[in-house]
Image: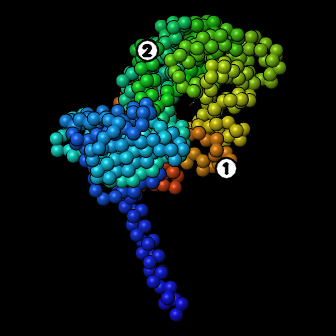
Amino acid sequence: MRQIKSLPYCIILLLFIFSSCQENRKTRADCPVIPKPLSCKLQSGTFTFGNSTVIELKTGDDGIKKAAEFLKCFVEQTGDCSIKIDSDDDTRNKIVFAVCDTISRDDAYTLKITPREITITSKSGEGAFYAVQTLRQLLPVACEKKICDENVVLDVPCVSIYDVPRFSHRGFMLDVARHYFPVDFIKKSIDMMALYKLNVLHLHLTDDQGWRVEIKSKPRLTSVGAWRRQSIVGHKNDEPRKYDGKRHGGYYTQEELREIVEYAQDRFIEVIPEIEMPGHTQSILAAYPQMACFPKDYEVSCDWGVHKNVLCTREESFKFLEDVLSEVFEIFPSKYIHIGGDECPKEQWSKCPVCQQNIKEMGLKDEYELQSYFINRMEKFVNSHGRQIIGWDEILEGGIAPNAIVMSWRGEEGGIKAAEMKHSVIMTPRDFCYLDYYQSEDRENEPLAIYGYLPLDSVYSYNPTEELTPEQSQYIRGIQGNLWTEYIATPEHAEYMAYPRLIALAEVGWSSQKERDYSDFIRRLSIQSKRLDFLQVNYAKHFLFSKK
Ligand code: ACM
Ligand code: ZN
Protein backbone atom coordinates (compact mmCIF):
# COMPACT_ATOMS: atom_id res chain seq x y z
CA MET A 1 0.00 0.00 0.00
CA ARG A 2 2.74 2.41 1.03
CA GLN A 3 4.64 1.49 -2.12
CA ILE A 4 1.67 2.20 -4.35
CA LYS A 5 1.06 5.56 -2.66
CA SER A 6 4.62 6.73 -3.11
CA LEU A 7 4.76 5.61 -6.76
CA PRO A 8 3.47 8.88 -8.29
CA TYR A 9 6.13 10.82 -6.37
CA CYS A 10 8.80 8.45 -7.67
CA ILE A 11 7.56 8.98 -11.20
CA ILE A 12 7.56 12.75 -10.73
CA LEU A 13 11.08 12.62 -9.29
CA LEU A 14 12.28 10.39 -12.14
CA LEU A 15 10.68 12.70 -14.67
CA PHE A 16 12.36 15.68 -12.99
CA ILE A 17 15.77 13.96 -13.00
CA PHE A 18 15.25 12.89 -16.62
CA SER A 19 14.23 16.38 -17.74
CA SER A 20 17.08 18.08 -15.90
CA CYS A 21 19.48 15.58 -17.47
CA GLN A 22 17.96 16.39 -20.84
CA GLU A 23 18.32 20.11 -20.09
CA ASN A 24 21.88 19.56 -18.97
CA ARG A 25 22.67 17.57 -22.07
CA LYS A 26 21.10 20.24 -24.26
CA THR A 27 22.95 23.14 -22.64
CA ARG A 28 26.21 21.21 -22.65
CA ALA A 29 25.72 20.17 -26.24
CA ASP A 30 24.82 23.56 -27.58
CA CYS A 31 26.97 26.18 -25.91
CA PRO A 32 29.79 26.82 -28.40
CA VAL A 33 31.80 29.10 -26.08
CA ILE A 34 35.46 28.57 -25.12
CA PRO A 35 36.38 28.80 -22.29
CA LYS A 36 33.24 27.11 -21.07
CA PRO A 37 31.15 29.47 -18.92
CA LEU A 38 30.30 28.52 -15.36
CA SER A 39 26.61 28.34 -16.15
CA CYS A 40 25.02 28.57 -19.59
CA LYS A 41 21.30 27.95 -20.13
CA LEU A 42 20.14 28.11 -23.72
CA GLN A 43 16.56 29.17 -24.37
CA SER A 44 14.44 29.27 -27.50
CA GLY A 45 14.51 32.27 -29.82
CA THR A 46 17.18 34.61 -31.12
CA PHE A 47 18.22 38.25 -30.93
CA THR A 48 19.14 39.81 -34.28
CA PHE A 49 21.51 42.75 -34.72
CA GLY A 50 20.48 45.36 -37.27
CA ASN A 51 20.67 49.03 -38.11
CA SER A 52 18.15 49.84 -35.41
CA THR A 53 20.22 48.13 -32.69
CA VAL A 54 21.32 50.50 -29.95
CA ILE A 55 23.86 49.98 -27.18
CA GLU A 56 22.51 51.54 -24.01
CA LEU A 57 25.05 52.38 -21.31
CA LYS A 58 23.42 52.54 -17.91
CA THR A 59 26.72 53.59 -16.33
CA GLY A 60 29.45 56.14 -16.86
CA ASP A 61 32.17 53.58 -16.07
CA ASP A 62 35.05 54.05 -18.56
CA GLY A 63 35.95 50.35 -18.60
CA ILE A 64 32.40 49.31 -19.40
CA LYS A 65 32.29 51.96 -22.11
CA LYS A 66 35.48 50.47 -23.58
CA ALA A 67 33.85 47.01 -23.62
CA ALA A 68 30.74 48.47 -25.31
CA GLU A 69 32.90 50.17 -27.92
CA PHE A 70 34.67 46.88 -28.66
CA LEU A 71 31.28 45.30 -29.32
CA LYS A 72 30.19 48.19 -31.54
CA CYS A 73 33.39 47.96 -33.63
CA PHE A 74 33.11 44.18 -33.86
CA VAL A 75 29.53 44.21 -35.10
CA GLU A 76 30.11 47.16 -37.44
CA GLN A 77 33.18 45.56 -39.06
CA THR A 78 30.92 42.83 -40.43
CA GLY A 79 29.37 45.17 -42.98
CA ASP A 80 26.51 47.57 -43.30
CA CYS A 81 25.28 47.42 -39.72
CA SER A 82 25.75 50.56 -37.71
CA ILE A 83 25.14 50.72 -33.97
CA LYS A 84 24.61 53.80 -31.86
CA ILE A 85 25.78 54.08 -28.24
CA ASP A 86 23.36 55.99 -26.00
CA SER A 87 22.82 56.46 -22.30
CA ASP A 88 19.03 56.22 -22.39
CA ASP A 89 17.06 54.57 -25.13
CA ASP A 90 13.58 53.16 -25.44
CA THR A 91 14.06 51.04 -28.56
CA ARG A 92 13.40 47.35 -28.30
CA ASN A 93 16.45 45.99 -30.11
CA LYS A 94 19.14 47.00 -27.70
CA ILE A 95 22.14 45.81 -25.72
CA VAL A 96 22.16 47.15 -22.20
CA PHE A 97 25.38 47.43 -20.20
CA ALA A 98 24.70 47.86 -16.50
CA VAL A 99 26.64 47.73 -13.25
CA CYS A 100 25.47 45.10 -10.83
CA ASP A 101 26.29 45.65 -7.17
CA THR A 102 25.66 42.07 -6.18
CA ILE A 103 28.53 40.86 -8.40
CA SER A 104 31.57 40.95 -6.14
CA ARG A 105 34.38 40.27 -8.59
CA ASP A 106 35.65 42.55 -11.34
CA ASP A 107 36.03 39.64 -13.74
CA ALA A 108 32.52 38.15 -13.36
CA TYR A 109 29.55 38.89 -15.60
CA THR A 110 26.04 37.91 -16.51
CA LEU A 111 24.80 37.84 -20.10
CA LYS A 112 21.09 37.50 -20.76
CA ILE A 113 19.87 37.36 -24.33
CA THR A 114 16.16 37.61 -25.13
CA PRO A 115 14.61 38.25 -28.56
CA ARG A 116 14.22 41.95 -27.73
CA GLU A 117 17.17 42.79 -25.55
CA ILE A 118 20.63 41.72 -24.50
CA THR A 119 21.61 42.61 -20.94
CA ILE A 120 25.19 42.52 -19.73
CA THR A 121 25.84 43.13 -16.06
CA SER A 122 29.20 43.31 -14.35
CA LYS A 123 31.00 45.17 -11.62
CA SER A 124 33.60 46.63 -13.98
CA GLY A 125 34.86 46.86 -17.54
CA GLU A 126 36.76 43.59 -17.20
CA GLY A 127 33.61 41.52 -16.63
CA ALA A 128 31.77 43.46 -19.36
CA PHE A 129 34.63 42.79 -21.79
CA TYR A 130 34.47 39.05 -21.06
CA ALA A 131 30.70 39.16 -21.65
CA VAL A 132 31.36 40.80 -25.02
CA GLN A 133 33.81 38.03 -25.96
CA THR A 134 31.16 35.45 -25.06
CA LEU A 135 28.57 37.33 -27.12
CA ARG A 136 31.05 37.45 -30.00
CA GLN A 137 31.45 33.68 -29.85
CA LEU A 138 27.67 33.27 -29.97
CA LEU A 139 27.49 35.26 -33.23
CA PRO A 140 28.02 33.38 -36.51
CA VAL A 141 31.71 32.61 -37.01
CA ALA A 142 31.60 34.44 -40.36
CA CYS A 143 31.38 37.71 -38.38
CA GLU A 144 35.13 37.41 -37.75
CA LYS A 145 35.66 38.16 -41.43
CA LYS A 146 35.81 41.85 -42.10
CA ILE A 147 32.81 42.60 -44.35
CA CYS A 148 31.07 39.27 -44.10
CA ASP A 149 28.71 37.95 -46.77
CA GLU A 150 25.37 39.69 -47.17
CA ASN A 151 23.47 36.53 -46.37
CA VAL A 152 24.98 36.16 -42.90
CA VAL A 153 22.30 36.96 -40.34
CA LEU A 154 23.77 38.60 -37.27
CA ASP A 155 21.81 36.68 -34.69
CA VAL A 156 22.60 35.10 -31.37
CA PRO A 157 20.63 32.43 -29.49
CA CYS A 158 18.68 33.39 -26.40
CA VAL A 159 20.71 32.38 -23.42
CA SER A 160 21.29 33.10 -19.78
CA ILE A 161 24.93 32.98 -18.68
CA TYR A 162 26.65 33.59 -15.37
CA ASP A 163 30.40 33.37 -15.60
CA VAL A 164 33.50 33.93 -13.51
CA PRO A 165 37.05 32.63 -14.03
CA ARG A 166 38.62 29.96 -11.82
CA PHE A 167 42.03 31.71 -11.73
CA SER A 168 43.05 35.35 -11.89
CA HIS A 169 46.28 34.81 -13.87
CA ARG A 170 45.66 33.24 -17.27
CA GLY A 171 48.85 33.86 -19.15
CA PHE A 172 50.69 33.43 -22.40
CA MET A 173 54.47 33.82 -22.51
CA LEU A 174 55.98 34.75 -25.83
CA ASP A 175 59.77 34.49 -26.16
CA VAL A 176 60.73 37.37 -28.44
CA ALA A 177 64.40 37.10 -27.42
CA ARG A 178 65.38 33.89 -29.22
CA HIS A 179 63.67 35.20 -32.33
CA TYR A 180 62.41 38.69 -32.94
CA PHE A 181 58.69 38.85 -33.80
CA PRO A 182 57.04 41.87 -35.45
CA VAL A 183 54.79 44.21 -33.43
CA ASP A 184 51.81 43.25 -35.60
CA PHE A 185 52.23 39.61 -34.63
CA ILE A 186 52.29 40.55 -30.94
CA LYS A 187 49.06 42.50 -31.48
CA LYS A 188 47.48 39.56 -33.28
CA SER A 189 48.47 37.33 -30.34
CA ILE A 190 46.81 39.83 -27.99
CA ASP A 191 43.65 39.66 -30.13
CA MET A 192 43.62 35.88 -29.77
CA MET A 193 44.19 36.11 -26.03
CA ALA A 194 41.26 38.51 -25.72
CA LEU A 195 38.97 36.17 -27.64
CA TYR A 196 39.73 33.34 -25.20
CA LYS A 197 39.81 35.51 -22.05
CA LEU A 198 43.52 35.16 -21.34
CA ASN A 199 44.62 38.20 -19.37
CA VAL A 200 48.42 38.26 -19.00
CA LEU A 201 50.94 38.58 -21.82
CA HIS A 202 54.39 37.75 -20.43
CA LEU A 203 57.00 39.06 -22.86
CA HIS A 204 60.35 37.31 -22.51
CA LEU A 205 62.35 40.28 -23.76
CA THR A 206 65.97 39.43 -23.00
CA ASP A 207 68.18 36.36 -23.23
CA ASP A 208 71.64 35.17 -24.27
CA GLN A 209 70.66 35.32 -27.95
CA GLY A 210 69.16 38.81 -28.04
CA TRP A 211 68.13 41.92 -26.10
CA ARG A 212 64.87 43.34 -27.46
CA VAL A 213 63.92 46.37 -25.36
CA GLU A 214 65.28 49.84 -26.05
CA ILE A 215 67.02 51.24 -22.95
CA LYS A 216 67.93 54.85 -23.65
CA SER A 217 70.67 55.10 -21.03
CA LYS A 218 72.32 51.89 -22.31
CA PRO A 219 72.26 52.18 -26.12
CA ARG A 220 74.66 49.28 -26.71
CA LEU A 221 72.06 46.86 -25.31
CA THR A 222 70.23 47.23 -28.59
CA SER A 223 72.91 48.45 -31.01
CA VAL A 224 75.04 45.41 -30.06
CA GLY A 225 72.87 43.16 -27.87
CA ALA A 226 69.90 42.92 -30.24
CA TRP A 227 71.87 41.25 -33.05
CA ARG A 228 73.49 37.86 -33.37
CA ARG A 229 75.83 36.78 -36.11
CA GLN A 230 73.92 33.63 -37.08
CA SER A 231 71.49 31.01 -35.86
CA ILE A 232 71.56 27.23 -35.60
CA VAL A 233 70.05 25.32 -38.50
CA GLY A 234 68.45 22.04 -37.42
CA HIS A 235 68.66 20.87 -33.81
CA LYS A 236 71.44 21.92 -31.46
CA ASN A 237 72.17 18.23 -30.82
CA ASP A 238 72.79 17.51 -34.51
CA GLU A 239 76.36 16.57 -35.27
CA PRO A 240 78.03 18.49 -36.69
CA ARG A 241 76.12 21.56 -35.48
CA LYS A 242 75.15 23.74 -38.47
CA TYR A 243 74.57 27.50 -38.75
CA ASP A 244 72.79 29.67 -41.32
CA GLY A 245 75.43 32.43 -41.47
CA LYS A 246 72.64 35.05 -41.40
CA ARG A 247 72.55 37.98 -38.97
CA HIS A 248 69.35 37.91 -36.90
CA GLY A 249 67.87 40.46 -34.58
CA GLY A 250 65.75 43.50 -33.96
CA TYR A 251 64.31 45.28 -30.97
CA TYR A 252 61.24 47.18 -29.85
CA THR A 253 61.49 50.92 -29.30
CA GLN A 254 59.97 52.23 -26.09
CA GLU A 255 57.27 53.84 -28.21
CA GLU A 256 56.40 50.49 -29.82
CA LEU A 257 56.27 48.78 -26.44
CA ARG A 258 53.97 51.50 -25.06
CA GLU A 259 51.74 50.95 -28.08
CA ILE A 260 51.66 47.19 -27.31
CA VAL A 261 50.85 47.89 -23.63
CA GLU A 262 48.00 50.21 -24.62
CA TYR A 263 46.66 47.77 -27.21
CA ALA A 264 46.63 45.07 -24.53
CA GLN A 265 45.04 47.37 -21.92
CA ASP A 266 42.20 48.08 -24.33
CA ARG A 267 41.58 44.32 -24.25
CA PHE A 268 41.94 43.99 -20.46
CA ILE A 269 45.30 42.26 -20.78
CA GLU A 270 48.32 43.13 -18.66
CA VAL A 271 51.75 42.96 -20.27
CA ILE A 272 54.43 41.72 -17.87
CA PRO A 273 57.99 42.24 -19.09
CA GLU A 274 60.70 39.74 -18.27
CA ILE A 275 64.24 41.05 -17.86
CA GLU A 276 66.41 37.99 -17.21
CA MET A 277 69.04 38.03 -14.45
CA PRO A 278 71.60 36.96 -13.35
CA GLY A 279 71.80 34.15 -15.95
CA HIS A 280 70.64 34.18 -19.58
CA THR A 281 72.49 37.48 -19.92
CA GLN A 282 75.17 36.93 -22.56
CA SER A 283 73.61 39.64 -24.75
CA ILE A 284 74.31 42.13 -21.90
CA LEU A 285 77.90 40.92 -21.68
CA ALA A 286 78.33 41.35 -25.44
CA ALA A 287 77.27 44.98 -25.10
CA TYR A 288 78.84 45.73 -21.69
CA PRO A 289 81.58 43.15 -20.97
CA GLN A 290 82.47 44.90 -17.70
CA MET A 291 79.33 43.28 -16.21
CA ALA A 292 80.96 39.83 -16.47
CA CYS A 293 83.05 38.10 -13.79
CA PHE A 294 85.84 37.92 -16.38
CA PRO A 295 85.52 40.84 -18.83
CA LYS A 296 86.53 39.99 -22.39
CA ASP A 297 84.93 40.11 -25.84
CA TYR A 298 81.63 38.24 -25.66
CA GLU A 299 79.30 37.85 -28.59
CA VAL A 300 75.52 37.67 -28.57
CA SER A 301 75.08 33.92 -28.46
CA CYS A 302 74.45 31.99 -31.65
CA ASP A 303 73.74 28.79 -29.72
CA TRP A 304 70.75 27.46 -27.80
CA GLY A 305 70.99 26.08 -24.28
CA VAL A 306 72.15 27.13 -20.83
CA HIS A 307 75.16 29.46 -20.90
CA LYS A 308 77.85 29.79 -18.26
CA ASN A 309 78.49 33.50 -18.97
CA VAL A 310 76.40 35.32 -16.38
CA LEU A 311 76.35 38.69 -14.62
CA CYS A 312 78.97 39.21 -11.93
CA THR A 313 77.63 40.13 -8.47
CA ARG A 314 79.84 43.21 -8.27
CA GLU A 315 78.18 46.53 -7.35
CA GLU A 316 78.17 47.82 -10.94
CA SER A 317 75.85 44.98 -12.02
CA PHE A 318 73.18 46.05 -9.53
CA LYS A 319 73.50 49.69 -10.55
CA PHE A 320 73.29 48.63 -14.21
CA LEU A 321 70.14 46.57 -13.66
CA GLU A 322 68.53 49.32 -11.57
CA ASP A 323 69.06 51.77 -14.43
CA VAL A 324 67.55 49.28 -16.86
CA LEU A 325 64.55 48.55 -14.62
CA SER A 326 63.93 52.26 -14.03
CA GLU A 327 63.24 52.61 -17.76
CA VAL A 328 61.27 49.35 -17.83
CA PHE A 329 58.96 50.69 -15.08
CA GLU A 330 58.26 53.72 -17.27
CA ILE A 331 57.24 51.57 -20.24
CA PHE A 332 55.28 48.86 -18.44
CA PRO A 333 52.75 49.91 -15.78
CA SER A 334 52.25 46.25 -14.71
CA LYS A 335 52.12 45.47 -11.01
CA TYR A 336 54.55 42.59 -11.65
CA ILE A 337 58.02 42.54 -13.18
CA HIS A 338 59.50 39.17 -14.11
CA ILE A 339 63.20 39.00 -13.28
CA GLY A 340 63.88 35.49 -14.61
CA GLY A 341 66.27 33.84 -12.14
CA ASP A 342 66.36 30.47 -13.92
CA GLU A 343 69.28 28.40 -15.14
CA CYS A 344 72.18 30.43 -13.74
CA PRO A 345 75.28 28.19 -13.71
CA LYS A 346 77.52 28.97 -10.74
CA GLU A 347 80.81 28.08 -12.48
CA GLN A 348 82.06 31.63 -12.97
CA TRP A 349 80.93 32.88 -9.57
CA SER A 350 82.89 30.04 -7.98
CA LYS A 351 86.07 31.23 -9.73
CA CYS A 352 85.51 35.00 -9.52
CA PRO A 353 87.40 36.85 -6.74
CA VAL A 354 84.67 39.50 -6.44
CA CYS A 355 81.84 36.96 -6.13
CA GLN A 356 83.85 34.87 -3.66
CA GLN A 357 84.61 37.99 -1.62
CA ASN A 358 80.86 38.78 -1.56
CA ILE A 359 80.08 35.29 -0.27
CA LYS A 360 82.68 35.71 2.47
CA GLU A 361 81.74 39.23 3.50
CA MET A 362 78.04 38.49 3.68
CA GLY A 363 78.54 35.21 5.49
CA LEU A 364 76.78 33.24 2.73
CA LYS A 365 77.05 29.48 2.54
CA ASP A 366 77.60 29.10 -1.19
CA GLU A 367 76.83 30.40 -4.70
CA TYR A 368 73.16 29.43 -4.31
CA GLU A 369 72.86 31.80 -1.38
CA LEU A 370 74.69 34.38 -3.51
CA GLN A 371 71.98 34.01 -6.15
CA SER A 372 69.37 34.41 -3.42
CA TYR A 373 71.16 37.59 -2.27
CA PHE A 374 71.10 38.84 -5.88
CA ILE A 375 67.36 38.26 -6.26
CA ASN A 376 66.57 39.66 -2.79
CA ARG A 377 68.43 42.81 -3.62
CA MET A 378 66.64 43.27 -6.92
CA GLU A 379 63.35 42.56 -5.20
CA LYS A 380 63.97 45.41 -2.73
CA PHE A 381 64.57 47.76 -5.64
CA VAL A 382 61.47 46.59 -7.50
CA ASN A 383 59.32 46.79 -4.34
CA SER A 384 60.61 50.31 -3.63
CA HIS A 385 59.00 51.29 -6.95
CA GLY A 386 55.69 49.80 -5.93
CA ARG A 387 56.06 46.66 -8.03
CA GLN A 388 56.44 42.99 -7.20
CA ILE A 389 58.79 40.40 -8.71
CA ILE A 390 57.94 37.14 -10.39
CA GLY A 391 60.74 34.60 -10.87
CA TRP A 392 61.17 31.07 -12.25
CA ASP A 393 61.22 28.36 -9.58
CA GLU A 394 65.02 28.46 -9.20
CA ILE A 395 64.50 31.60 -7.08
CA LEU A 396 63.60 29.20 -4.26
CA GLU A 397 67.19 27.93 -4.20
CA GLY A 398 69.30 29.51 -1.46
CA GLY A 399 66.18 31.10 0.06
CA ILE A 400 63.23 32.85 -1.58
CA ALA A 401 62.89 36.67 -1.55
CA PRO A 402 60.09 37.69 0.86
CA ASN A 403 57.52 39.04 -1.62
CA ALA A 404 58.35 37.02 -4.72
CA ILE A 405 55.80 35.18 -6.83
CA VAL A 406 57.04 31.84 -8.13
CA MET A 407 56.49 30.61 -11.67
CA SER A 408 56.77 26.85 -11.36
CA TRP A 409 58.15 25.40 -14.61
CA ARG A 410 60.33 22.34 -13.90
CA GLY A 411 57.24 20.65 -12.50
CA GLU A 412 54.84 21.53 -9.73
CA GLU A 413 57.28 20.88 -6.87
CA GLY A 414 58.64 24.45 -6.82
CA GLY A 415 55.12 25.85 -6.85
CA ILE A 416 54.01 23.57 -4.03
CA LYS A 417 57.08 24.48 -1.95
CA ALA A 418 56.40 28.18 -2.52
CA ALA A 419 52.71 27.75 -1.60
CA GLU A 420 53.80 25.99 1.61
CA MET A 421 55.74 29.18 2.40
CA LYS A 422 52.63 31.27 1.60
CA HIS A 423 53.98 32.71 -1.65
CA SER A 424 51.73 33.20 -4.65
CA VAL A 425 52.34 30.78 -7.49
CA ILE A 426 51.75 30.61 -11.20
CA MET A 427 51.76 27.03 -12.43
CA THR A 428 53.41 26.46 -15.77
CA PRO A 429 54.89 22.93 -15.49
CA ARG A 430 56.67 22.08 -18.72
CA ASP A 431 54.96 18.70 -19.10
CA PHE A 432 51.59 20.44 -19.50
CA CYS A 433 52.31 24.06 -20.45
CA TYR A 434 55.36 24.17 -22.76
CA LEU A 435 54.03 24.96 -26.19
CA ASP A 436 57.42 24.49 -27.87
CA TYR A 437 57.17 20.70 -27.37
CA TYR A 438 56.07 18.37 -30.18
CA GLN A 439 52.30 18.02 -30.39
CA SER A 440 52.28 14.79 -32.39
CA GLU A 441 54.26 11.56 -32.17
CA ASP A 442 54.65 11.67 -35.93
CA ARG A 443 57.80 13.82 -35.70
CA GLU A 444 58.72 13.26 -39.33
CA ASN A 445 55.72 15.29 -40.38
CA GLU A 446 56.10 18.00 -37.76
CA PRO A 447 58.29 21.07 -37.90
CA LEU A 448 61.46 20.64 -35.82
CA ALA A 449 60.76 21.20 -32.12
CA ILE A 450 62.96 21.40 -29.06
CA TYR A 451 61.94 17.94 -27.74
CA GLY A 452 59.09 16.53 -25.62
CA TYR A 453 55.61 15.36 -26.54
CA LEU A 454 52.66 17.42 -25.41
CA PRO A 455 49.47 16.67 -27.35
CA LEU A 456 46.30 18.71 -26.98
CA ASP A 457 44.52 16.22 -24.70
CA SER A 458 47.44 16.26 -22.24
CA VAL A 459 47.36 20.05 -22.10
CA TYR A 460 43.61 19.96 -21.56
CA SER A 461 43.92 17.34 -18.81
CA TYR A 462 45.93 19.68 -16.60
CA ASN A 463 44.38 20.53 -13.26
CA PRO A 464 46.72 22.88 -11.37
CA THR A 465 45.43 21.95 -7.93
CA GLU A 466 45.00 18.19 -8.37
CA GLU A 467 48.11 17.33 -6.34
CA LEU A 468 47.66 20.14 -3.83
CA THR A 469 45.96 20.41 -0.46
CA PRO A 470 43.15 23.01 -0.16
CA GLU A 471 45.53 25.15 1.92
CA GLN A 472 48.25 25.04 -0.79
CA SER A 473 45.66 25.60 -3.54
CA GLN A 474 44.78 29.01 -2.13
CA TYR A 475 48.16 30.32 -3.30
CA ILE A 476 47.74 29.22 -6.91
CA ARG A 477 47.11 32.44 -8.76
CA GLY A 478 46.83 30.77 -12.12
CA ILE A 479 48.43 29.09 -15.09
CA GLN A 480 50.37 30.02 -18.18
CA GLY A 481 51.34 28.58 -21.56
CA ASN A 482 54.95 29.29 -22.56
CA LEU A 483 56.14 29.57 -26.14
CA TRP A 484 59.93 29.47 -26.22
CA THR A 485 61.19 30.23 -29.69
CA GLU A 486 64.65 28.74 -30.19
CA TYR A 487 63.21 26.58 -32.98
CA ILE A 488 60.42 28.95 -34.01
CA ALA A 489 61.40 31.79 -36.31
CA THR A 490 58.17 32.92 -37.96
CA PRO A 491 54.69 34.05 -36.87
CA GLU A 492 53.12 31.16 -38.86
CA HIS A 493 55.21 28.59 -37.01
CA ALA A 494 54.54 30.29 -33.66
CA GLU A 495 50.78 30.09 -34.30
CA TYR A 496 51.06 26.43 -35.28
CA MET A 497 52.72 25.64 -31.94
CA ALA A 498 50.48 27.89 -29.84
CA TYR A 499 47.04 26.99 -31.17
CA PRO A 500 44.96 25.16 -30.25
CA ARG A 501 47.04 24.18 -27.19
CA LEU A 502 46.86 27.70 -25.75
CA ILE A 503 43.08 27.63 -26.24
CA ALA A 504 42.96 24.45 -24.14
CA LEU A 505 44.98 26.22 -21.45
CA ALA A 506 42.58 29.16 -21.59
CA GLU A 507 39.84 26.73 -20.56
CA VAL A 508 42.07 25.16 -17.87
CA GLY A 509 42.58 28.62 -16.40
CA TRP A 510 39.00 29.83 -16.68
CA SER A 511 36.48 27.01 -16.40
CA SER A 512 35.37 25.17 -13.33
CA GLN A 513 37.09 21.78 -13.08
CA LYS A 514 33.84 19.87 -12.75
CA GLU A 515 32.44 21.40 -15.95
CA ARG A 516 35.45 20.41 -18.05
CA ASP A 517 35.14 17.60 -20.55
CA TYR A 518 37.63 16.93 -23.34
CA SER A 519 35.18 15.59 -25.93
CA ASP A 520 32.90 18.58 -25.41
CA PHE A 521 35.95 20.87 -25.70
CA ILE A 522 36.82 19.26 -29.05
CA ARG A 523 33.21 19.76 -30.22
CA ARG A 524 33.40 23.45 -29.35
CA LEU A 525 36.93 23.74 -30.78
CA SER A 526 35.70 22.34 -34.09
CA ILE A 527 33.19 25.20 -34.23
CA GLN A 528 35.94 27.64 -33.21
CA SER A 529 38.24 26.33 -35.93
CA LYS A 530 36.11 28.10 -38.55
CA ARG A 531 36.52 31.30 -36.54
CA LEU A 532 40.29 30.76 -36.55
CA ASP A 533 40.17 30.25 -40.33
CA PHE A 534 38.47 33.64 -40.75
CA LEU A 535 41.03 35.19 -38.42
CA GLN A 536 43.80 33.69 -40.59
CA VAL A 537 45.38 31.87 -37.68
CA ASN A 538 47.70 29.01 -38.63
CA TYR A 539 46.53 26.56 -35.95
CA ALA A 540 47.55 22.90 -35.80
CA LYS A 541 44.72 20.71 -37.10
CA HIS A 542 45.42 17.30 -35.51
CA PHE A 543 42.23 17.52 -33.41
CA LEU A 544 40.06 17.66 -36.53
CA PHE A 545 41.27 14.19 -37.54
CA SER A 546 41.70 12.47 -34.19
CA LYS A 547 39.08 9.97 -33.00
CA LYS A 548 39.05 11.27 -29.42
C1 ACM B 1 62.75 27.97 -18.45
O1 ACM B 1 62.12 27.22 -19.22
N1 ACM B 1 64.07 28.00 -18.47
C2 ACM B 1 62.05 28.82 -17.51
ZN1 ZN C 1 81.85 37.70 -10.30
Residue at 22% across, 37% down:
81
Q: Which color mode does the image show? A: rainbow
- Mark 2 and mark 1 lie on one chain; the one further toward the N terminus is 2
Q: Nearer the viewer, mark 2 or mark 1?
A: 2
- Confirm if mark 1 falls within 8 A of ligand 1: no
Q: How many marks?
A: 2
Q: Amino acid at mark 2?
A: Glu
Residue at 48% across, 35% down: 199
The Cα atoms of the two marked residues, 2 and 1, are separated by: 45 Å
For mark 1, what is the residue? 469
Residue 390 disc label = none
Residue 331's spot in the image, x, y percent? 50, 17
Which residue carries the number 2 mark?
A: 255
SS at circle 1: loop
The image quadrant of residue 455 is top left
Q: Is residue 499 above or below residue 220?
A: below
In the image, what residue type sits under mark 1? Answer: Thr
Using the image as rendered, state which of residue 208 and residue 39 is in the foreground.
39
| Residue ID at (68%, 40%) | 419
Instruction: Say left or right for 148 vs 156.
Output: left
> Of residues 444 and 288, which is closer to you in this image?
288
Residue 194 visible in the picture: no
Q: Position of residue 91 (x, y in %)?
A: 27, 44
